[in-house]
Image: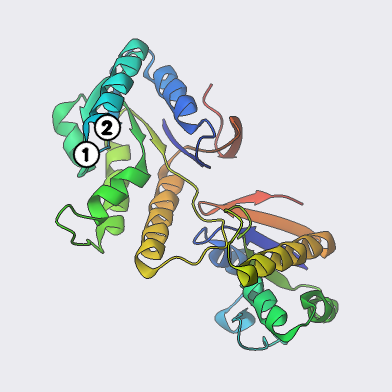
Amino acid sequence: MYLIIGGAYQGKMEYAAQRFGLSEEDIYVCTDDHEPDFSRRCLHHVERYVRFCLKKGADPAEKLEKWSVSHGDGVLICEDIFCGVVPTDEETRAWREAAGRCAAWAAGKAEGVVRLFCGLPQVLK
Amino acid sequence: MRVFISGGVKNGKSSHAQNIAKKLSGGGPLYYVATMIPHDDEDYRRISRHIKEREGMGFETIECPRDILKCLEKAKPEGVFLLDSTTALLSNEMFLEDGEINHDAADKIAKELVRFAESIGGFVAVSDAIYSDAAEYEALTEEYRKGLASIDRALAGCCDTVLEICCGTVFCHKGEFPI
């Protein structure tokens, strides 16, 4: 499994698609109001899936763990939402923390972690 | 040589950019492209202080809050140009003084900056990394962020060197550190 991380609009999905040969059908764009399609090879906007899990009171790592076992060549894409001011809104604060823990968990599991900066890849692991 | 620099606020981007631009100029023409539109006396005082500081470093200041290609009419194209910052340039061109919004500003600026970079002796451009927080912005601010990111990526693509500055420390994402 690979983890691709980076701020908004930094070219994460384009990089993942090119590097791992992903087609549009391989990529699932997560939302905070639907269970993702775990049959896909790439889950994009994992931080939104984390928000979905928070609403349901579920642990995001649980299903992602199963997914990563059945998708050895899987790619997680997560937006870096971790560098701003502490959100005043409690829900956003909890979301940011849970997403941060999830990203750290994924980075620990992943065989490679790449950060995108202005469209350029930086290998973190 | 063309260098693009980004990173967080107050992390030392400008001073690195000035040193790199001076180094690249090798004693030749060295220009500071001033993008700020002053609004009150405090702004004017700050600007005149900065101009004095840069004169000491050998920079000639060119006022250019929008339409970057106009710099070519006021300066020697073989010189080195420091643009600090694309962030201000986009805000000047997108949010017009009469309150109107130019939704095409980012595309226009990205194209003009690439052309500008290719028309001059040396280029150092500074932007701001504003893409890594959990805040949900209203549509216009989000459009601005997306627009600035597209300018960043166009510049990162056309520049020889791309640097990220963090706490005054440099990480080189592309090419080589020019000093």
Q: Position of residue A31 (x, y in %)?
A: 59, 81
Circle 1 residue: B39
Q: Secondary structure at mark 1?
A: loop
The residue pinned by badge 2 equals B43
Q: Are marks 1 and 2 on the same chain?
A: yes
Q: Nearer the viewer, residue B44 or B70?
A: B44
Q: Is residue A24 left or right of residue B146?
A: right
Q: Residue at x 43, y 49 (%)?
A: B152
Residue at the spot x=77%, y=72% of the render?
A73
CA neighbours of label 2 inside 10 A, class few (<14), some (14 to 19), many (20+): few
- Vertical side of B70 occupied by B146: above or below: below
Identified at 74% across, 73% down, the residue is A74
Of the residues shown, which amino acid type is indicated by label 1? His
Could you tell me which residue is drawn at 42 percent across and 38 percent down?
Answer: B126
Q: Residues within 10 Å of mark 1 (few under 14, many from 20)?
A: few
Q: Depth check: A39 or A86 in front?
A: A86
Counting from the top left corner in percent of width and height, residue A97 is at 71, 63
Quarter holding the C terminus of chain B is top right
Q: Which mark is residue A84?
A: none
List x then y, in percent, for residue B158: 41, 45
Element under disc 2: helix
Could you tell me if residue B96 is visible in this image? yes
Q: Position of residue B97 (x, y in %)?
A: 17, 52
Left or right relative to A21: residue B91? left
Contact? badges 1 and 2 (CB < 8 Å): yes
Q: Label 2 amino acid?
A: Asp
Q: Alpha carbon of mark 1 to alpha carbon of mark 2: how far?
A: 6 Å
Q: Is A103 on the left-hand or right-hand side of B48?
A: right
Image mark 1: chain: B
